[in-house]
Amino acid sequence: MLLGPKMSSLKQNLSYLMLGQRGGENRIKILEHLKERSYNLNQLSNELDLNYRTIKYHIDILSEYDLIDKSGEGYGKVYFLSPKMEENYDMLERMKGKLQTVSKSPKLYEKVVEQIHDALILLDENKDIILTNKSAEEITGYKDEDLLGKNIETLLDSDIHQDLVEEVLRRDEFVKKMINIETKSGETKNVIVTLDYFHFDGDGDKGFSLIIKDVTREAEQREVLNALMDHSEVMMAYLNLDFDLVYVNSAYAKNTDHSPEELVGMNHFDLFPDGEKKKIFQGVIEEGEPKSIEDSGLFEPEGCDDEDIYCSLEPVKNEKDSVKGLVLSLFKVPP
C-alpha cells in the first residue's frame, strides 16, 4: 500500500493521516471508539454506519502506522488502541480540533487544495466540472478555461466515468480504479482515479469529487518488475500479514490448479495446509528477520522431490520498521 511521505514522529503521522488525507474524520471516530473498548470490523461498521470495506481500509492504514493493535483470528479478530496511541491520546484530540478548524475555514481549505500534488476536480450532479486545482492542469494539460463548465467526458471515456458513477451510487462509498487517460497533448498516462459522491447538508448541493493520481512512472517500473518475476523459475509470492496472496508469479501458479488471477486473495495455507510451517511464517512476522527452511511437503512442484525445494521468507517492512508482508520464494537447489 502507498501511504505517503516518510514520517518520523507520532505527531507527524497523525497530522498526515487525519489532516493530510481524505477520511481523517472517520479515522478519528474509529480511534475514539477503540479507546472505549475493542471492536471487530463488523461492529465498527454498524457503530459508525460505514461500509465494511471502508472500515477495513481505514483499519489497515491505522495498523500500518502502529496506532492500533489486534487480537484473535478470523471473525473473532478485534482491534484496540496500541500502547503508543493510548499514551498520547491527547494528540488525537488536538488533531480533531484542527480538523474542525480546517473544515470551517474556506480560505484555509482552498489553500490546502491548491497545494496537494493530485488533481482535484469537483463535478455537479450532471457531471459538469465546477472546480479544479493547479495539479489538475499539471497532470492533464488542461487549463481551467478548458475544463470549467465542460462535462467530465472531456477527461474520461464515457463508458469509464459512467461505470464509476454507477458504482459509487450503488455502493454509497468512494470508488478507486486504475485507468489510462489521454492528456491535452495526446500523451497517455496511467492514473488512479478516486470518485466520491457528496451532499452538503442544508443547502441541497450534490455532486462528485474526482481525484486523479499520476502513477505512470510507478506503472512502468511495475511492468518491468512483473516481467522479471514472471520469467523467473523461482516460485514467488507476496503475502499479507494474514498470509493471503497479494501477488504470485507464473512459476508459483504453474504448480497449482489456479491461474495467477484466481490465486490473488486466496490464503497460502488454505492451498497448502501446514500448521508447523504457519508457525514459522508467523515467527518471521514477529521477529522481522528473514528465514530459509528446507521444504518438506509445503509445496510440491511438478517433477521435483520435496527435499530438492527450499523456502525463503523475506519480511517487507514499512517506514516505521514494522513488518507489513512477506515475500515467499521457493526454489530448487542443485544436488
Image (cartoon, grey):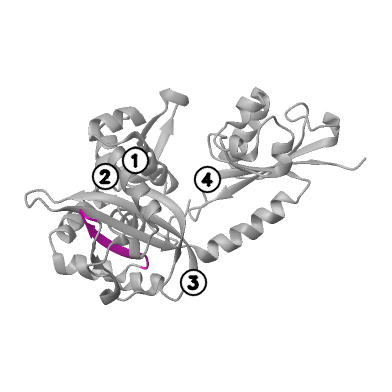
Residue 122 x %, y %: 25, 61
- Residues under labels 1 and 2: Cα distance? 9 Å
- For label 3, the SS is loop
Judged by its main secondary structure, the magenta piece is strand
Question: For the point 38% across and 58% down, which residue is it?
Answer: 9
Q: Amino acid type of disc 2?
A: Asn
Residue density around tag 2, few if under 14, some if 14–19, many if 20 or more, within 10 Å: some
* Label located before the other in sequence (1 or 2): 2
* Label located before the other in sequence (1 or 3): 1
Label at residue 187: 3
Q: Is residue 304 left or right of residue 323?
A: right
- Residues under labels 4 and 3: Cα distance? 35 Å
> 238 or 119, which is in the foreground?
119
Label at residue 26: 2
The residue wearing badge 1 is 54
> 88 or 200, which is in the foreground?
200
Q: Amino acid type of disc 3?
A: Glu
* Label located before the other in sequence (4 or 2): 2
- For label 2, the SS is helix
Q: Is residue 241 left or right of residue 305?
A: left
- Residues under labels 4 and 1: Cα distance? 19 Å
Magenta residues (range) = 117-126
The residue wearing badge 4 is 324
Residue 191 visible (yes or no): yes
